[in-house]
Every structure is written in structure tokens, then in C-alpha cells.
Image: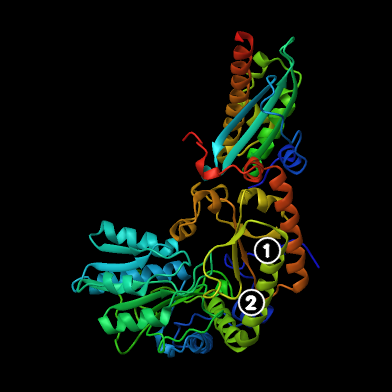
């Protein structure tokens, strides 16, 4: 076993060697521009993009022409939300989203608020899921779009996508889902789930960075988006710019592998994740899982280790790469907005660790990680005045911390 | 974020971890920060009442590695100083010694606050003790 061990697969995944293999010729001998219509270099690139488009579409039950390639999911989220707001702004000025969305959705909605749109940020329960009745109540005749993620990037909680889709369809409102973490990990079907727009990213599913896609429904209803990037009219004029052919080829291959291997990979990762959780819970008191275990990505575990600040825990297990919801690891010095939305107190949010398992993790790595975490939590609790107070029976919530 | 060797050494091998009897009149206890902010430092000193020299200093800290290292370093610097000398310790000296990155300078501020709180507690107890 080699260290460091990578358990931060919600941040990014390594490129699968099979994906890299598929990409390589498109950097060198097959370097053509997919928009070059009059020579074989262009045709070859165009053919490769066509093939990749088919594979991406197949992963989510879409048809080829509904896939718009982008630079990544942030761009896809922006295009979906701003593009729909611009196109359908005459019909309504209201968007519904949720408090635990990724910043690419939240900040896009905030910008639209500055342009005069109204946005409802649905709360989530302790399990991290929205309440469908609250969603139904939030939709008005001014609502044009609902944007709810399929799976959360911090806590891995799955939203009831199918029910949300059905509700939006019934109410005649477009449904966008940020499916970055869910795609390739759990089944998604744009028909069965009544999804109108879906953001995808290659580098979260063992493909390369810098390439993503937006699924745009082409019929029942046909969704139209105002382009956010003007130029040569690529991608059905919704996203101009020369196509990143090697990236797109890699994305296609990554989707194909996920689609084929998901039935074995998902239960394998869920078993490893459950093994990690069981080991930690057996050896440590006062550890808490954040979010629903039932409705969760197979590869996610997010836990709070009371009385141990997250950054110090990350440092203590430096040979294992994970991330924390602690403010001390974020640029803003604010604890995770996702944990806050769940109602996890700041004091526990500061102690949270996100484990993101991936295709290349082994049981040996998981056992090693569990051992390191247990050892480090115990060591840091010996250092923690809060643990000492709690063991003495002091109720930390009743202590006056003086501002 | 990359940290200095000195900081990592204090984080991995913290000095003077522990607790003193907070009811001992020779002991001053300072507790600063709040769990909701992600930092709580408890710093204690035991002072020789005759000389005013700090004989023992110890800490427990809930916080990031910079907070743990700042308090560990503070306890080392406190030992052997008089209480008045202890009050001369500045957060900037701690930050410099540990090469704290700018976003972590507040950890050294907290350590200075903890020193002041511990000394203030000792002085308060001492005054009460003498009045009795």
C-alpha cells in the first residue's frame, strides 16, 4: 500500500487509465478541429465527438443531440440557470433552489436576484433532503425554474429527484439538476426522472478536468436557452467555442465505463464506506454522521468528531487526503453552509470530515485510514479542553463563551 | 497551506499538555475562544508566590494546528518568566516564531489573550488571598 491515500473523490477523481488511453491520439495525430468541415482531420474529430456525445447521453438516458459540451459543471450550471432565466424571463421571474446547493448554483441565483429575479432557497431537514410539500408550496405561477441537485458534494445526500421531476412536470416548471456528484455513481434517467436540464462534469467520474456537459431537453418540452457565450455557434448555438476534442473523448469514455461498471462499483464502494463507518463508530464515542445514510451516494461518508477541530484532524492524518467542513480549511473562514443548513451547530460543523471514496480505493487503504483517524481523534481529544469539560459533566452549551 | 517545521513540531509533539488544579491559589487559568468559532484555548500557569516566577505552564486547545502550536509555544515561553514578564509576550512574536500564514495570525492573538486571561486570573486570586 502506498501513501498518501486519496479519499477526496468528491473534489476530483484521477483519470482512469482507460480514459487516458482513449484521449491520447486526439492530442497528437488526430488533432483536428471538429468544426472543420472540409478535410479528414476535421471529420475524424467530429466523428470522435459524435461517439462521445452518444456515450454521455447513454449514461443518463438522453439522446445525442441533447448534450451540450461545456468547460465543466460550473459553466453548465450558469448556462442552465442564466440561459433559462433569459429565455423564459417574460413568463415569470421566480426560481426555486435549495440551501445546500453548490456555489455554482447559489451564486448564479444570487446574481439573478440582482437582475430582478426572486429566488426561494428551500431549507433541508436534518437528513439533508428537501420537503416535497415545501417545494410544491414554493412553486407559483411566476416560477420558471426549479434547480435542485441530485447528490450533494459534501454529505452525498440524494434528493428525491424523481418526485421533484414529476412535480415540476405537473406544474409546468422546468427542472434543472446539478448531477455532478450523482452521475456515474447512481442511476439517473432524464425520462423517468423528468429532468429538463442536467449539469455533468467529467473530472468527478474519472475523466479529465476542463470538460463537462449540460443536458438540454429537446422535446416534451423543448427547452431553449439563451447562449451565455457568443461566437461560432457551436453546440446548437448554445455554447460557442472550439470543442475540447481530447477532453470530450475522455468524458465519453469515462461515462461509458461508469455506465458499464456501476452495478459492481456502487455496492463495492458502499461496502467499503460502511466498513469505514463501522470501524470508526466501534472505537470512538461521540461521532455523528451528517445527513441521511439511507439516501446517500455509495462513496460518501461525512462525519463529525466532537471536540476535535477538523483542520487539526486533517493535519494529524496527513497521509490520508480528505477534506473538512471546518472554517479553518475554507477560504472564507466560514464553516460549511451545507452542514449549517442541516442544522448542525457551528461547534460540530468545525469537527466534520468528508470521506470521498473512489474506484481505486482498496480495503487495505480503508482499514489504514480508519486506524489513523481513530488514533488521531484520540490524541487530539487528549489535547481538547472541550473533551475534558464534557467528561467532567460540563454542559458545553450552557457555558458562557463570552461572545 | 504549507506550514513551518517549527509549527509542525509543536503540533505533532505539543509541549506541556495538561491541566492544573484550578482551585489552587497559585494557579491562574485562562480560557478563551468559543467552540462555535472553532477555537478554544485553556492555558494555565502555576506561580511561585514569593518570586512571582511561573513554575509551571500547561494548556489544552481545541482548534486548528496553528492554534495548538501557538498555545504549545506560549507555555514554553511562560515557564521561568515572572508574571509581569509574561505579559510582555506579544502575538506577533508567536506568529513570527511559527511562521503563521496571514489567515492564521488570529491563532497567535488567541494565545496572547489566553496568557493575559491566565495571569489576570492568578492576580485576582492572589489579591483575594491577601485580603483574607
Q: Is residue A298 left or right of residue A158?
A: right
Q: Nearer the viewer, residue B93 or B80?
A: B80
For the residue carrying disc 1, how many other residues have a C-alpha within 10 Å: few (<14), some (14-19), or many (20+)? some
Q: Secondary structure at mark 1?
A: helix
Sequence order check: which comes first, mark 1 or mark 2?
Answer: 2
Report the residue at 58% width, 41% height from top. B39
Q: Which residue is mark 2?
A: A270
Q: Position of residue B110 (x, y in %)?
A: 58, 32
Q: Nearer the viewer, residue A236 or A16?
A: A16
Front position among marks 1 and 2:
1
> In the figure, A151 relative to B76: above or below?
below
Q: Is residue A361 left or right of residue A301?
A: right
Whether discs 1 and 2 lie on one chain: the answer is yes
Is disc 1 in contact with disc 2, using a CB cutoff of under 8 Å?
no
Report the residue at 60% width, 22% height from top. B121
Q: Which residue is mark 1?
A: A281
Q: Nearer the viewer, residue B4 or A378?
A: A378
Q: Position of residue A65 (x, y in %)?
A: 40, 88
Q: Position of residue A293 (x, y in %)?
A: 56, 72
Q: Quadrant of the C terminus of chain B?
A: top right
Amino acid at each position: 500500500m502506498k501513501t498518501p491515500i486519496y479519499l477526496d473523490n468528491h473534489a476530483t477523481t484521477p483519470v482512469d487509465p482507460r480514459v487516458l488511453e482513449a484521449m491520447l491520439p486526439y492530442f497528437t495525430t488526430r488533432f483536428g478541429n471538429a468544426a472543420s468541415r472540409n478535410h479528414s482531420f476535421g471529420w475524424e474529430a467530429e466523428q470522435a465527438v459524435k461517439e462521445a456525445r452518444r456515450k454521455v447521453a447513454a449514461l443518463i438516458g438522453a439522446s445525442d443531440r441533447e448534450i451540450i459540451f461545456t468547460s465543466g459543471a460550473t459553466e453548465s450550471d450558469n448556462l442552465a440557470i442564466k440561459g433559462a432565466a433569459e429565455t423564459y424571463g417574460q413568463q415569470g421571474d421566480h426560481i426555486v433552489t435549495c440551501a445546500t446547493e453548490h456555489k455554482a448554483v447559489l451564486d448564479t441565483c444570487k446574481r439573478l436576484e440582482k437582475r430582478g429575479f426572486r429566488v426561494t432557497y428551500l431549507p433541508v431537514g436534518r437528513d439533508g433532503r428537501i420537503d416535497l410539500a415545501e417545494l410544491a408550496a414554493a412553486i407559483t405561477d411566476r416560477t420558471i425554474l426549479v434547480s435542485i441537485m441530485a447528490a450533494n458534494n459534501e454529505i452525498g445526500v440524494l434528493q428525491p429527484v424523481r418526485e421533484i421531476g414529476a412535480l415540476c412536470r405537473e406544474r409546468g416548471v422546468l427542472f434543472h439538476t446539478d448531477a455532478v456528484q450523482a452521475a456515474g455513481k447512481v442511476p439517473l434517467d432524464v425520462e423517468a426522472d423528468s429532468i429538463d436540464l442536467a449539469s455533468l462534469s467529467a473530472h468527478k467520474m474519472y475523466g479529465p478536468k476542463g470538460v463537462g456537459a449540460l443536458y438540454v431537453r429537446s422535446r416534451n418540452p423543448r427547452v431553449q436557452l439563451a447562449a451565455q457565450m457568443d461566437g461560432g455557434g457551436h453546440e446548437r448555438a448554445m455554447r460557442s467555442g472550439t470543442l475540447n476534442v481530447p477532453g470530450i473523448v475522455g468524458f465519453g469514455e469515462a461515462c461509458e465505463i461508469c455506465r458499464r461498471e456501476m452495478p459492481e462499483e456502487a455496492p463495492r464502494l458502499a461496502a467499503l464506506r460502511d466498513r469505514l463507518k463501522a470501524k470508526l463508530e466501534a472505537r470512538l464515542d461521540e461521532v455523528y454522521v451528517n445527513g441521511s445514510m439511507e439516501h446517500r451516494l455509495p462513496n460518501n461518508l461525512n462525519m463529525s468528531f466532537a471536540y476535535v477541530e477538523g483542520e487539526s484532524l486533517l493535519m494529524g492524518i496527513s497521509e490520508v487526503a480528505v477534506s473538512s467542513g471546518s472554517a479553518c480549511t475554507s477560504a472564507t473562514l466560514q464553516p460549511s453552509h451545507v452542514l449549517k443548513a442541516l442544522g448542525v451547530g457551528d461547534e460540530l460543523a468545525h469537527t466534520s470530515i468528508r470521506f470521498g471514496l473512489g474506484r481505486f480505493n482498496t480495503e487495505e487503504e480503508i482499514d489504514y485510514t480508519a486506524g489513523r483517524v481513530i488514533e488521531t481523534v484520540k490524541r487530539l481529544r487528549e489535547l481538547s479542553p472541550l473533551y475534558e469539560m464534557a467528561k467532567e459533566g460540563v454542559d458545553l452549551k450552557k457555558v458562557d463563551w463570552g461572545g | 497551506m504549507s506550514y513551518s517545521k517549527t509549527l509542525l513540531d509543536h503540533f505533532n509533539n505539543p509541549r506541556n499538555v495538561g491541566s492544573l488544579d484550578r482551585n489552587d491559589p497559585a494557579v491562574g487559568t485562562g480560557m478563551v475562544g468559543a467552540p462555535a468559532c472553532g477555537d478554544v484555548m485553556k492555558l494555565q500557569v502555576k506561580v511561585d508566590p514569593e518570586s512571582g516566577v511561573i513554575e509551571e505552564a500547561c494548556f489544552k486547545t481545541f482548534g486548528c494546528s496553528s492554534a495548538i502550536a501557538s498555545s504549545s509555544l506560549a507555555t514554553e515561553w511562560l515557564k521561568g518568566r515572572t508574571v509581569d514578564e509574561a505579559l510582555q509576550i506579544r502575538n506577533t512574536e508567536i506568529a513570527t516564531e511559527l511562521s503563521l500564514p496571514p489567515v492564521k495570525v488570529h491563532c497567535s492573538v488567541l494565545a496572547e489573550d489566553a496568557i493575559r486571561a491566565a495571569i489576570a486570573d492568578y492576580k485576582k486570586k492572589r489579591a483575594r488571598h491577601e485580603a483574607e
